[in-house]
Amino acid sequence: MTLNKIMKYLGKFFHSRKKLKFFGLYDSEENLVYPIESIFYPSKTGSPYNFNQLHPILCINPSKIIGIGKNYRAHVKEMNSEVPTEPIMFLKASNSIIGPEEKIILPNDIGMVEYEGEIGVIIKKEAENISEEAAMDYVLGYTCTNDVTARDLQKKDGQWVRAKSFRTFCPVGPWILPVEQFPKYQNLALTTYVNDKPVQGARAGSMIFSIPYLVSFISRVMTLYPGDIILTGTPNGVGPIKRNYKIAIEIEPIGTLINRVGGESTAIKQPLTATKDNQRRLENQP
Ligand code: MG
Protein backbone atom coordinates (compact mmCIF):
# COMPACT_ATOMS: atom_id res chain seq x y z
CA MET A 1 0.00 0.00 0.00
CA THR A 2 1.11 3.60 -0.40
CA LEU A 3 1.19 5.44 2.88
CA ASN A 4 0.01 8.99 2.76
CA LYS A 5 3.27 10.80 3.43
CA ILE A 6 1.86 13.30 5.90
CA MET A 7 0.74 10.61 8.33
CA LYS A 8 1.98 10.37 11.89
CA TYR A 9 1.12 7.33 13.98
CA LEU A 10 1.10 6.48 17.70
CA GLY A 11 2.50 3.14 18.75
CA LYS A 12 4.96 1.12 20.78
CA PHE A 13 8.22 -0.05 19.28
CA PHE A 14 10.98 -2.54 19.99
CA HIS A 15 14.61 -1.83 19.16
CA SER A 16 16.03 -5.35 18.92
CA ARG A 17 19.71 -4.39 19.06
CA LYS A 18 19.27 -2.12 22.10
CA LYS A 19 16.63 -4.40 23.66
CA LEU A 20 14.55 -1.28 24.17
CA LYS A 21 10.77 -0.91 24.20
CA PHE A 22 9.22 2.56 24.02
CA PHE A 23 6.11 4.45 23.02
CA GLY A 24 6.69 6.40 19.85
CA LEU A 25 5.34 8.85 17.34
CA TYR A 26 6.09 7.42 13.91
CA ASP A 27 6.54 10.09 11.25
CA SER A 28 6.14 8.19 7.97
CA GLU A 29 7.48 11.11 5.92
CA GLU A 30 10.75 11.36 7.86
CA ASN A 31 10.86 7.58 8.43
CA LEU A 32 11.65 8.36 12.08
CA VAL A 33 10.09 7.32 15.38
CA TYR A 34 10.21 9.86 18.22
CA PRO A 35 10.06 8.45 21.76
CA ILE A 36 7.00 9.85 23.58
CA GLU A 37 5.67 9.68 27.11
CA SER A 38 2.72 7.48 26.11
CA ILE A 39 0.18 7.17 23.31
CA PHE A 40 -2.13 9.35 25.44
CA TYR A 41 0.56 12.01 26.15
CA PRO A 42 2.52 12.19 22.91
CA SER A 43 5.08 14.77 24.07
CA LYS A 44 8.53 13.88 22.71
CA THR A 45 11.04 12.65 25.29
CA GLY A 46 14.20 12.04 23.29
CA SER A 47 16.02 11.74 20.00
CA PRO A 48 14.33 9.83 17.18
CA TYR A 49 15.24 6.37 15.87
CA ASN A 50 15.28 5.27 12.27
CA PHE A 51 12.04 3.37 11.68
CA ASN A 52 13.94 0.60 9.85
CA GLN A 53 15.66 -0.40 13.12
CA LEU A 54 12.35 -0.94 14.93
CA HIS A 55 9.49 -3.42 15.14
CA PRO A 56 6.00 -2.26 16.15
CA ILE A 57 4.64 -4.11 19.19
CA LEU A 58 1.34 -4.13 21.06
CA CYS A 59 0.70 -0.57 22.29
CA ILE A 60 -2.51 -0.82 24.35
CA ASN A 61 -3.60 -2.69 27.45
CA PRO A 62 -7.39 -2.34 27.37
CA SER A 63 -9.65 -2.78 30.39
CA LYS A 64 -12.11 -4.26 27.92
CA ILE A 65 -12.58 -5.14 24.27
CA ILE A 66 -16.08 -4.41 22.97
CA GLY A 67 -17.18 -6.13 19.78
CA ILE A 68 -20.00 -5.14 17.47
CA GLY A 69 -21.77 -7.87 15.52
CA LYS A 70 -23.41 -7.57 12.08
CA ASN A 71 -22.49 -3.97 11.25
CA TYR A 72 -22.22 -4.36 7.44
CA ARG A 73 -25.24 -5.34 5.34
CA ALA A 74 -23.35 -7.75 3.06
CA HIS A 75 -22.01 -9.62 6.12
CA VAL A 76 -25.51 -9.83 7.63
CA LYS A 77 -26.60 -11.41 4.36
CA GLU A 78 -23.78 -13.97 4.25
CA MET A 79 -24.65 -14.99 7.82
CA ASN A 80 -28.33 -15.45 6.74
CA SER A 81 -29.30 -12.98 9.43
CA GLU A 82 -31.46 -9.88 9.88
CA VAL A 83 -30.18 -6.30 9.73
CA PRO A 84 -30.06 -5.23 13.40
CA THR A 85 -32.12 -2.24 14.55
CA GLU A 86 -29.60 -1.39 17.28
CA PRO A 87 -25.92 -2.33 17.70
CA ILE A 88 -25.26 -5.90 18.82
CA MET A 89 -22.62 -5.67 21.54
CA PHE A 90 -20.41 -8.39 22.95
CA LEU A 91 -17.22 -8.58 25.00
CA LYS A 92 -13.96 -10.30 24.18
CA ALA A 93 -11.67 -11.12 27.11
CA SER A 94 -9.08 -8.34 27.35
CA ASN A 95 -6.22 -10.85 27.42
CA SER A 96 -7.14 -12.23 24.01
CA ILE A 97 -5.14 -9.29 22.65
CA ILE A 98 -1.86 -9.75 20.75
CA GLY A 99 0.33 -7.40 18.73
CA PRO A 100 1.62 -7.36 15.17
CA GLU A 101 3.58 -10.44 14.03
CA GLU A 102 2.52 -12.44 17.10
CA LYS A 103 0.99 -15.82 16.39
CA ILE A 104 -2.73 -16.62 16.50
CA ILE A 105 -2.86 -19.97 18.30
CA LEU A 106 -5.66 -22.36 17.38
CA PRO A 107 -6.64 -24.47 20.37
CA ASN A 108 -7.25 -28.14 19.64
CA ASP A 109 -10.77 -29.47 19.23
CA ILE A 110 -12.77 -26.26 19.01
CA GLY A 111 -14.03 -26.73 15.45
CA MET A 112 -13.97 -24.04 12.79
CA VAL A 113 -12.19 -20.76 13.53
CA GLU A 114 -12.60 -17.73 11.25
CA TYR A 115 -10.87 -14.38 10.70
CA GLU A 116 -12.87 -11.14 10.84
CA GLY A 117 -10.95 -8.09 9.61
CA GLU A 118 -12.23 -4.97 11.40
CA ILE A 119 -11.56 -1.31 12.00
CA GLY A 120 -10.57 -0.90 15.66
CA VAL A 121 -11.40 2.30 17.57
CA ILE A 122 -9.18 3.20 20.55
CA ILE A 123 -10.66 5.27 23.38
CA LYS A 124 -8.71 8.36 24.52
CA LYS A 125 -10.42 9.40 27.75
CA GLU A 126 -13.05 8.21 30.18
CA ALA A 127 -16.46 8.27 28.50
CA GLU A 128 -19.90 7.95 30.11
CA ASN A 129 -23.19 8.90 28.47
CA ILE A 130 -21.51 10.72 25.60
CA SER A 131 -23.60 12.17 22.78
CA GLU A 132 -22.97 11.11 19.21
CA GLU A 133 -21.92 14.70 18.40
CA ALA A 134 -19.22 14.68 21.11
CA ALA A 135 -18.14 11.07 20.62
CA MET A 136 -15.07 11.63 18.45
CA ASP A 137 -13.51 13.84 21.18
CA TYR A 138 -13.22 10.62 23.20
CA VAL A 139 -11.51 8.63 20.46
CA LEU A 140 -7.72 8.49 20.24
CA GLY A 141 -7.60 6.89 16.82
CA TYR A 142 -8.06 3.85 14.63
CA THR A 143 -6.13 0.66 14.13
CA CYS A 144 -6.38 -2.68 12.33
CA THR A 145 -7.94 -5.56 14.23
CA ASN A 146 -8.88 -9.18 13.67
CA ASP A 147 -11.90 -10.42 15.64
CA VAL A 148 -10.88 -14.09 15.48
CA THR A 149 -13.95 -16.22 16.17
CA ALA A 150 -14.50 -19.90 16.95
CA ARG A 151 -17.53 -20.11 14.66
CA ASP A 152 -18.80 -23.54 15.71
CA LEU A 153 -18.67 -22.60 19.40
CA GLN A 154 -20.38 -19.26 18.68
CA LYS A 155 -23.32 -21.11 17.10
CA LYS A 156 -23.37 -23.80 19.78
CA ASP A 157 -23.18 -21.41 22.75
CA GLY A 158 -25.73 -18.83 21.61
CA GLN A 159 -23.88 -16.12 23.49
CA TRP A 160 -20.46 -15.35 22.14
CA VAL A 161 -17.96 -14.79 24.92
CA ARG A 162 -16.22 -18.17 24.70
CA ALA A 163 -16.01 -18.16 20.89
CA LYS A 164 -14.45 -14.69 20.90
CA SER A 165 -12.13 -14.86 23.91
CA PHE A 166 -9.48 -17.52 23.39
CA ARG A 167 -5.95 -16.30 24.05
CA THR A 168 -4.47 -14.68 20.92
CA PHE A 169 -7.92 -14.19 19.29
CA CYS A 170 -7.60 -10.38 19.13
CA PRO A 171 -4.66 -9.20 17.00
CA VAL A 172 -4.31 -5.38 17.08
CA GLY A 173 -1.93 -2.98 15.34
CA PRO A 174 0.55 -2.24 13.96
CA TRP A 175 -0.05 1.30 15.35
CA ILE A 176 -2.78 3.89 15.81
CA LEU A 177 -3.80 6.58 13.34
CA PRO A 178 -4.86 9.57 15.50
CA VAL A 179 -8.33 11.00 14.78
CA GLU A 180 -6.86 14.49 14.09
CA GLN A 181 -4.73 12.99 11.31
CA PHE A 182 -7.77 11.59 9.54
CA PRO A 183 -11.06 13.23 10.56
CA LYS A 184 -13.03 11.68 7.67
CA TYR A 185 -13.15 8.24 9.24
CA GLN A 186 -15.79 7.19 6.67
CA ASN A 187 -12.94 6.89 4.15
CA LEU A 188 -10.95 4.31 6.11
CA ALA A 189 -10.68 1.40 3.68
CA LEU A 190 -10.32 -2.14 5.01
CA THR A 191 -8.94 -5.11 3.08
CA THR A 192 -8.30 -8.55 4.56
CA TYR A 193 -5.81 -10.90 2.91
CA VAL A 194 -5.50 -14.61 3.57
CA ASN A 195 -2.16 -15.92 2.33
CA ASP A 196 -1.82 -12.69 0.29
CA LYS A 197 -5.18 -13.14 -1.47
CA PRO A 198 -7.79 -10.39 -0.83
CA VAL A 199 -10.92 -11.82 0.77
CA GLN A 200 -12.70 -8.86 2.43
CA GLY A 201 -13.02 -5.21 1.49
CA ALA A 202 -15.15 -2.31 2.76
CA ARG A 203 -15.06 1.34 3.72
CA ALA A 204 -16.00 2.58 7.19
CA GLY A 205 -18.71 4.67 5.52
CA SER A 206 -20.72 1.53 4.77
CA MET A 207 -21.14 0.51 8.42
CA ILE A 208 -24.78 0.24 9.53
CA PHE A 209 -23.92 2.05 12.80
CA SER A 210 -21.17 4.69 12.46
CA ILE A 211 -18.14 5.02 14.72
CA PRO A 212 -19.51 8.05 16.69
CA TYR A 213 -22.88 6.33 17.04
CA LEU A 214 -21.19 3.21 18.45
CA VAL A 215 -19.04 5.17 20.95
CA SER A 216 -22.11 7.05 22.15
CA PHE A 217 -24.27 3.90 22.33
CA ILE A 218 -21.68 1.89 24.26
CA SER A 219 -20.94 4.81 26.64
CA ARG A 220 -24.57 4.77 27.74
CA VAL A 221 -24.09 1.20 28.95
CA MET A 222 -20.53 0.99 30.28
CA THR A 223 -17.78 3.43 31.14
CA LEU A 224 -15.10 3.48 28.48
CA TYR A 225 -11.52 3.99 29.68
CA PRO A 226 -8.37 5.12 27.87
CA GLY A 227 -7.04 2.23 25.81
CA ASP A 228 -10.35 0.38 25.59
CA ILE A 229 -10.96 -0.84 22.08
CA ILE A 230 -14.10 -1.20 20.01
CA LEU A 231 -14.11 -3.71 17.15
CA THR A 232 -16.60 -2.10 14.80
CA GLY A 233 -17.75 -5.21 12.93
CA THR A 234 -16.56 -7.20 9.94
CA PRO A 235 -17.64 -6.88 6.31
CA ASN A 236 -18.60 -9.86 4.16
CA GLY A 237 -16.04 -12.44 3.12
CA VAL A 238 -15.29 -14.12 6.46
CA GLY A 239 -13.70 -17.54 6.19
CA PRO A 240 -11.74 -20.22 8.01
CA ILE A 241 -8.16 -19.96 9.22
CA LYS A 242 -5.84 -22.89 9.57
CA ARG A 243 -2.34 -23.56 10.83
CA ASN A 244 0.41 -21.80 8.89
CA TYR A 245 -1.99 -19.32 7.29
CA LYS A 246 -0.88 -15.70 7.04
CA ILE A 247 -3.66 -13.21 7.82
CA ALA A 248 -3.14 -9.55 6.90
CA ILE A 249 -5.61 -6.78 7.78
CA GLU A 250 -4.84 -3.64 5.82
CA ILE A 251 -6.54 -0.31 6.43
CA GLU A 252 -5.77 2.68 4.21
CA PRO A 253 -4.17 4.93 5.38
CA ILE A 254 -3.08 3.13 8.55
CA GLY A 255 -1.02 0.15 7.47
CA THR A 256 -1.12 -3.63 7.67
CA LEU A 257 -1.47 -5.95 10.64
CA ILE A 258 0.09 -9.34 9.90
CA ASN A 259 -0.30 -12.45 12.06
CA ARG A 260 0.49 -16.03 11.23
CA VAL A 261 -1.50 -18.95 12.57
CA GLY A 262 -0.12 -21.73 14.71
CA GLY A 263 -1.52 -24.64 16.66
CA GLU A 264 -1.35 -25.51 20.32
CA SER A 265 1.97 -27.14 21.00
CA THR A 266 4.19 -28.08 23.89
CA ALA A 267 6.48 -25.17 23.00
CA ILE A 268 3.65 -22.74 23.78
CA LYS A 269 2.80 -24.48 27.05
CA GLN A 270 6.41 -24.15 28.19
CA PRO A 271 7.17 -20.50 27.44
CA LEU A 272 10.55 -20.65 29.17
CA THR A 273 11.98 -22.73 26.34
CA ALA A 274 13.48 -19.84 24.44
CA THR A 275 11.96 -20.24 21.02
CA LYS A 276 12.00 -17.07 18.95
CA ASP A 277 8.20 -16.81 19.03
CA ASN A 278 8.02 -17.18 22.78
CA GLN A 279 10.77 -14.63 23.25
CA ARG A 280 8.84 -12.15 21.09
CA ARG A 281 5.67 -12.89 23.02
CA LEU A 282 7.39 -12.08 26.31
CA GLU A 283 9.01 -8.96 24.94
CA ASN A 284 5.77 -7.73 23.42
CA GLN A 285 3.89 -7.52 26.70
CA PRO A 286 3.01 -3.87 27.24
MG1 MG B 1 -16.53 -9.28 14.57
Image (spheres, rainbow, N blue to C red):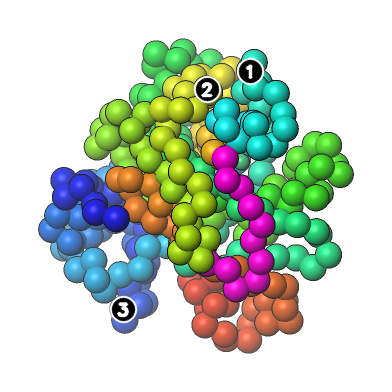
Ligand 1, image quadrant it occupies: top right
Q: Nearer the viewer, mark 2 or mark 3?
A: 2
Earlier in the chain: of badge 2 and badge 1, it is 1
Residue drawn 33% across the image and 45% down it: 252
Between 65 and 105, the one nearer to me in the picture: 105
**What amino acid is found at the position of numbered circle 1 in the picture?**
Glu
The answer to whether residue 179 is seen in the rendering is yes
Residue matched to label 3: 18
Query: Picture coordinates of residue 154 (x, y %)?
Result: 78, 44
Between 39 and 268, the one nearer to me in the picture: 268
Q: Give the CA separation, mark 2 to mark 1.
A: 8 Å
Query: Picture coordinates of residue 138 (x, y %)?
Result: 41, 27
Residue drawn 60% across the image and 73% down it: 244
**What amino acid is found at the position of numbered circle 2 in the picture?**
Phe
| Vertical arrangement, residue 22 with respect to residue 228, above or below | below
Could you say which quadrant of the image residue 178 lies in? top left
Residue matched to label 2: 209
Element under disc 3: loop
| Mark 3 vs ligand 1: CB below 8 Å | no
Q: What's drawn in magenta, residue-wise?
A: 236-247
